[in-house]
Image: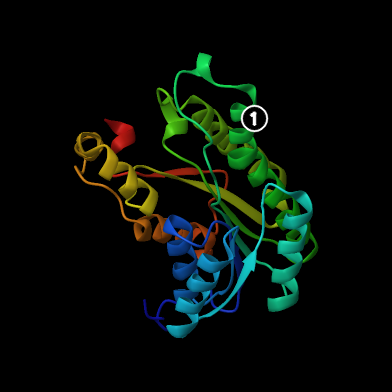
């Protein structure tokens, strides 16, 4: 990764990205930095957060690592405070962190597993938005991009809790966009298809036949790369998308239209 001075669409802005230690979140943090933003790299894993921030700085960008549990309200409040204190404000946020706690038939799900999935995929996004928006309201507005999933668009067998949680993220995005659009805050979401992240790669190693089927599920007949999600997020976060709010953008190689 190298910083590109010609891509300064977020120049002078302060940003945070949750779940930025690996995969899609990492790619988003790097894209924000390439676009000129100062980035707070947030992850529950301090080592991966530090590695992402170090990579950005080595490439000529500006980033700090921060450890946070975004399902804990006090930790989220501290995260936003850290960004504001470190960079002088917060104009851009991407809420990417999510963990699904289980898969299988819904009648076999425990209440605990279902509740945990909602907490780690939906409630955490609400908590992040609560504190991000509160700061942006008092400081001239900003842009928030939430990460959803194509599982939310038409359901996904044996992944029902995750699909339900991400459907909640979609409506959380749209409803909050309608609340704050006239107050200078744009809120959108990106819905990834199957993306080549470390977690997906491990899954494919365990289930090689499934990998080919998922590739064929996209109209483009391939998996997506984390950087392709990051480019869409960077666009929505930037002033190039200044008249776009309340939208869900699928970045999925055409899987949603098949």
Q: Nearer the viewer, residue 195 or 33?
A: 195
Q: Which residue: 34% across, 34% down? A: 256
Colouring chosen for the image of the structure: rainbow
Q: Secondary structure at mark 1?
A: helix
Q: Nearer the viewer, residue 69 or 252?
A: 69
Residue 139 sits in which quadrant?
A: bottom right
Q: Which residue: 44% across, 68% down? A: 31
Q: Is residue 254 left or right of residue 118?
A: left
Residue 144 image point, x, y percent: 60, 55
For mark 1, does the 10 Å Cα neighbourhood hold few (<14), some (14 to 19), or many (20 or more) residues?
A: some
Q: Which residue: 33% across, 47% down? A: 202
Pick the quarter of the image with the C terminus. top left
Q: Is residue 8 something one can see in this rendering?
A: no
Seen as rendered, the residue at the extreme front is 206
Q: Which residue is mark 1?
A: 115
Q: Which residue: 28% across, 40% down? A: 206
Q: Is residue 238 something one can see in this rendering?
A: yes
Q: In the rendered view, would you say 235 is above or below 187?
A: below
Q: Is residue 208 left or right of residue 181?
A: left
Pick the quarter of the image with the N terminus. bottom left
Q: Nearer the viewer, residue 252 or 105?
A: 105
Q: In the rendered view, would you say 236 is above or below 50?
A: above
Residue 155 image point, x, y percent: 43, 25
Residue 244 image point, x, y percent: 53, 51
Q: Nearer the viewer, residue 157 or 192?
A: 157
Q: In the rendered view, would you say 146 is above or below 216?
A: below
Q: Is residue 146 left or right of residue 218?
A: right
Residue 3 image point, x, y percent: 41, 81
């Amino acid at each position: 990764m190298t910083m590109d001075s010609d891509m300064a669409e977020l120049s002078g802005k302060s940003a945070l990205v949750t779940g930025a230690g690996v995969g899609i979140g990492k790619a988003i943090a790097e894209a924000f930095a390439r676009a000129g933003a100062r980035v707070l790299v947030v992850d529950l894993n301090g080592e991966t957060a530090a590695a992402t921030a170090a990579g950005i700085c080595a490439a000529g960008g500006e980033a700090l690592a921060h450890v946070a549990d975004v399902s804990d309200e006090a930790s989220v409040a501290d995260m936003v405070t850290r960004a504001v204190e470190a960079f002088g404000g917060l104009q851009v946020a991407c809420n990417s962190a999510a963990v699904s706690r289980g898969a299988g038939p819904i009648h076999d799900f425990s209440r605990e597993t279902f509740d945990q999935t909602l907490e780690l995929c939906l409630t955490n996004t609400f908590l992040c938005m609560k504190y991000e928006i509160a700061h942006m309201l008092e400081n001239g507005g900003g842009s928030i991009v939430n990460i959803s999933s194509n599982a939310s668009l038409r359901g996904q067998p044996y992944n029902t809790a995750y699909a339900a949680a991400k459907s909640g993220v979609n409506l959380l995005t749209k409803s909050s966009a309608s609340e704050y659009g006239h107050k200078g805050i744009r809120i959108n979401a990106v819905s990834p298809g199957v993306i080549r992240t470390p977690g997906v790669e491990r899954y494919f190693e365990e289930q090689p036949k499934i990998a080919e089927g998922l590739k064929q599920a996209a109209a483009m007949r391939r998996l997506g790369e984390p950087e392709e999600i990051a480019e869409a997020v960077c666009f929505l976060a930037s002033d190039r998308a200044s008249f776009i709010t309340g939208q869900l953008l699928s970045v999925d190689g055409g899987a949603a239209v098949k």
